[in-house]
């Protein structure tokens, strides 16, 4: 019984020594920071997806659901996929750079000439934005 207690105490001691070493060396905080950097700071949602056949484009409306505002520098921070095909972003309204406040919206305008998405077929839409934000939605034609 003393052998078992000694082994258990030795294992606990080694575990605590490793934990103290990792804490003092900064390994644990850096692991936490790496994990935190991969998590989005806010949440976005696709609230509208409308095809404009006259202009051969799709309008993807994104809302920032919060909890914090979302800053973006230019359209290159956004990627839109329709049916797993990457779409070319023509512009962003109201501005190609700026801040989306909580509950604020932007409209991403994508070019349909290379995408070829039909307004008569259902589609899946994926948006990847700055700060690791992402949103997914399904769309079906009315009628």
Image (cartoon, grey):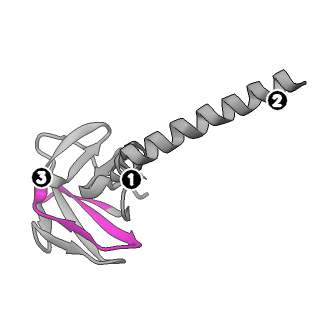
Taking the image as shown, residue 5 lies to the left or right of residue 29, namely: right
Task: Name the front one of labels 3 and 2.
Answer: 2
Dominant secondary structure (helix, strand or loop) of the stretch shown in magenta:
strand
In terms of secondary structure, where does tag 1 sit? helix
Residue 78 visible at all:
yes
Disc 3 designates what residue? 76
Residue, disc 2: 5
Question: Where residue 40 appears, x then y in whole percent?
Answer: 36, 57
- The residue most toward the top is 3
Q: Label 1 to label 3, Cα distance in Å? A: 23 Å
Q: Tag 1: Cα neighbours inside 10 Å, few (<14), some, or many (≥20)?
A: few
User: Which residue, given by chain and number where applicable, does mark 1 sit on?
Assistant: 36
Q: Upstream in the sequence, badge 3 or badge 2?
A: 2
Write the residue at 75% across / 29% down: 8
Q: Residue at x 11, y 72 (%)?
A: 95
Earlier in the chain: of badge 2 and badge 1, it is 2
Q: What range of the chain is rendered magenta?
A: 49-75
Helix or strand or loop: what does disc 2 sit on? helix
């Amino acid at each position: 019984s003393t052998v078992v207690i000694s082994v258990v105490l030795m294992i606990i001691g080694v575990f605590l020594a490793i934990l103290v070493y990792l804490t003092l060396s900064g390994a644990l905080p850096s692991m936490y920071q790496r994990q935190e950097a991969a998590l989005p700071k806010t949440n976005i949602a696709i609230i509208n997806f409308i095809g404009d056949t006259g202009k051969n484009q799709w309008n993807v409306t994104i809302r920032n659901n919060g909890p914090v505002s979302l800053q973006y520098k230019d359209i290159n921070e956004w990627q839109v996929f329709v049916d797993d095909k990457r779409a070319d972003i023509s512009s962003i309204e109201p501005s190609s750079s700026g801040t989306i406040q909580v509950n604020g919206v932007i409209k991403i305008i994508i070019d349909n000439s290379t995408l070829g998405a039909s307004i008569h077929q259902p589609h899946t839409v994926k948006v990847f934005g700055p700060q690791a934000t992402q949103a997914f939605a399904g769309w079906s034609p009315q009628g």
